[in-house]
């Protein structure tokens, strides 16, 4: 089942922060985050594994709450280059689900000067 | 490394025609995937493969077929094209170090069926 992302869209000014959430109704093994610029292919940001630590770089990080089957992506001090559509992809635990991602509908992030 | 390459970049098909979308990766990745992305929507998994000779259906396999005879190539076949297959098609590959692994995407094929 497709994970649900919120919000659907975010508008920021440079330097502002944003949080994008991803929620699943099924038990998760991992959560992946990708960013896609208009007309381009998605680009990998990070993976969070069940039992793993919060990940990220200085300004983009993510967390994974296994009990709630939710992940959040944190963008700090946003830059113009952060604009794009952010997708979470969920990998479900067990059986034939290993290796397959189900993507959310995306969150459109727009950063203005 | 070229990464993941896809051909063609654009194609217009008439209803009922068939075609093969080509995908090649040079990273020796075990896993390969085909997704479709409709305008303003997320990615839907069509088929995937965990290695040469092994393929499995994703969420939206109807109207498509795949084969994986080598590690490098994963072609997607459209039989009897329909307007509902108008979409952007992305091929991706990964090495499953952490779960499904970081997926590397090709540039996409933009297909219109009229």
Image (cartoon, coloured by chain):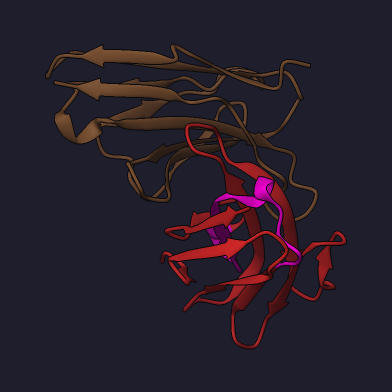
x 38%, y 31%: residue:
B88
Residue A54 lies left or right of residue B52; in this view the side is right
Residue A38, x across and y down, in percent? 49, 38
Q: Residue furthest front?
A: A113
Residue B9 lies left or right of residue A88; in this view the side is left
x 77%, y 54%: residue:
B98
The region drawn magenta spans: A75-97
Q: Is residue A93 magenta?
A: yes
Q: Nearer the viewer, residue A63 or A36?
A: A36
Query: Against B1, is A16 above or below?
Result: below
Residue A60: name its quadrant.
bottom right
Give the number of callouts.
0
Query: Against B3, is A39 above or below?
Result: below
- Chain A, colour shown: red
Q: Quadrant of the N terminus of chain A?
A: bottom left
Chain letter, brown: B
Residue B100, x across and y down, in percent? 67, 51
Residue B51, x across and y down, in percent? 64, 32
Q: Nearer the viewer, residue B10 or B53?
A: B10
Residue A63 visible to an observer of this rendering? yes
Residue B18 visible to an observer of this rendering? no
Query: Against A4, is B56 above or below?
Result: above
Residue B62, x across and y down, in percent? 26, 39
Q: Nearer the viewer, residue A72 or B77?
A: A72
Q: Is residue A78 magenta?
A: yes
x 24%, y 32%: residue:
B85
Query: Against A94, is A70 above or below?
Result: below
Q: Nearer the viewer, residue A24 or B50?
A: A24
x 62%, y 62%: residue:
A13
């Amino acid at each position: 089942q497709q994970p649900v992302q919120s919000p659907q869209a975010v508008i920021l000014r440079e330097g502002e922060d944003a949080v994008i959430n991803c929620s699943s109704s099924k038990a998760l093994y991992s959560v992946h985050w990708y960013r896609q610029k208009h007309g381009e292919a998605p680009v990998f940001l990070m993976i969070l594994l069940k039992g793993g630590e919060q990940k990220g770089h200085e300004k983009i990080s993510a967390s994974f709450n296994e009990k709630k089957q939710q992940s959040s992506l944190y963008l700090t001090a946003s830059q113009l280059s952060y604009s794009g559509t952010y997708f979470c992809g969920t990998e479900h635990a067990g059986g034939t689900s290993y290796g397959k991602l189900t993507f959310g509908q995306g969150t459109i992030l727009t950063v203005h000067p | 490394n070229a990464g993941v390459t896809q051909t063609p970049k654009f194609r217009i098909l008439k209803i009922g025609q068939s075609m093969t979308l080509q995908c090649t990766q040079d990273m020796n990745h075990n896993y390969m995937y085909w997704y479709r992305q409709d305008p303003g929507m997320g990615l839907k998994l069509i088929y995937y493969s965990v290695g040469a000779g092994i393929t499995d259906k994703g969420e939206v396999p109807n109207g498509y077929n795949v084969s994986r005879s080598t590690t490098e190539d994963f072609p997607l076949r459209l039989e009897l094209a329909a307007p509902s297959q108008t979409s952007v098609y992305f091929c991706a590959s990964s090495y499953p170090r952490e779960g499904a692994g970081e997926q590397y995407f090709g540039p996409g094929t933009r297909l219109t069926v009229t």
